[in-house]
Amino acid sequence: MNFPDLMEGAIMAVVLLFSIIIHEVAHAYSAWLNGDPTARLMGRITLNPIPHIDPIGTVLLPILLMVSGSGVIFGWAKPVLINARNFRRYRWGQITVSASGPLSNLALATCCAYLLRFNPTNPGLALMALYGCKINIFLALFNLIPIPPLDGSHLLAAFLPPQLARLYSYLEPVGFILILLLFYTGVMGLVLMPLYRQIARFLLGA
């Protein structure tokens, strides 16, 4: 891997780290607004990356993807702990806290796309804004997949009858196995990529 490729990979890694931190901070702040101080007391309403770092998802996986030259960098932060029993309105709390993460990523994607419209002359800034838009669109869509423990599953569970929601939660221990299978078989790409392209075309105008 040559120096320009390393620099591009480093920019992608920085953008990914910032994006997943914003995602988790949005969850934590939304939970606090809904009456649950758990995440705030654990120091998760901060842009300091240290409380959010997951050794595998935030460090090991992005480095392996970058070194392997895969062209895609992906990862996750340490999940924010939420105690929904503290919510003033349980269902509304579940909906707003779950939606806040993906919405924060879409907001970042929109800001980055808006920055690109000014045609920044600094190539590093332009590349960072481009990846900021693309990575955040993907993060938003990925997290909206209705497979536990992703945000989409919590949004769906908020609208299910309690007994069905409880049965649905039993998928959580095997959720990431299901997600990996869907990625490996290409099913995930068939679902996500058309949506990704539509949103990217709308935001980037290309």
Image (tube, grey):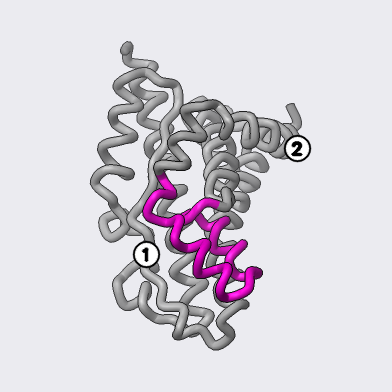
Where is mark 2, residue-wise? 202
Q: Which of 122 and 115 is in front in this view?
A: 115
Q: Position of residue 41 (x, y in %)?
A: 32, 78
Could you tell me how far apart the alpha carbons at marks 2 and 1 are, in whole angstroms?
31 Å
Secondary element at tag 2: helix
**Crowd tier of the residue under label 1, counting other residues whose Cα lies within 10 Å: few below 14, some 14–19, many 20 or above:** some
Checking the image for residue 46, the label placed there is 1
Q: Where is residue 107 in the image (x, y as percent from the top left)?
A: 61, 53
Q: Which amino acid does label 1 sit on?
A: Thr
Q: Residue furthest top?
A: 2
Q: Nearer the viewer, residue 47 or 29?
A: 29
**Crowd tier of the residue under label 2, counting other residues whose Cα lies within 10 Å: few below 14, some 14–19, many 20 or above:** few
Is residue 117 visible to the viewer in this orientation of the structure? Answer: no
Residue at image position (36%, 24%) is 7
Q: Which residues are drawn in magenta?
A: 147-176
Work out which quarter of the rendered image holds the N terminus and state it.
top left
Is residue 130 visible to the viewer in this orientation of the structure? Answer: yes
Side (left or right) of 61 relative to 164 = left
Q: Quadrant of residue 66?
A: top left
Q: Which amino acid does label 2 sit on?
A: Phe
Residue at image position (52%, 61%) is 168
Question: Is residue 135 found inside the magenta-colored segment of the image?
Answer: no
Residue at image position (44%, 49%) is 175
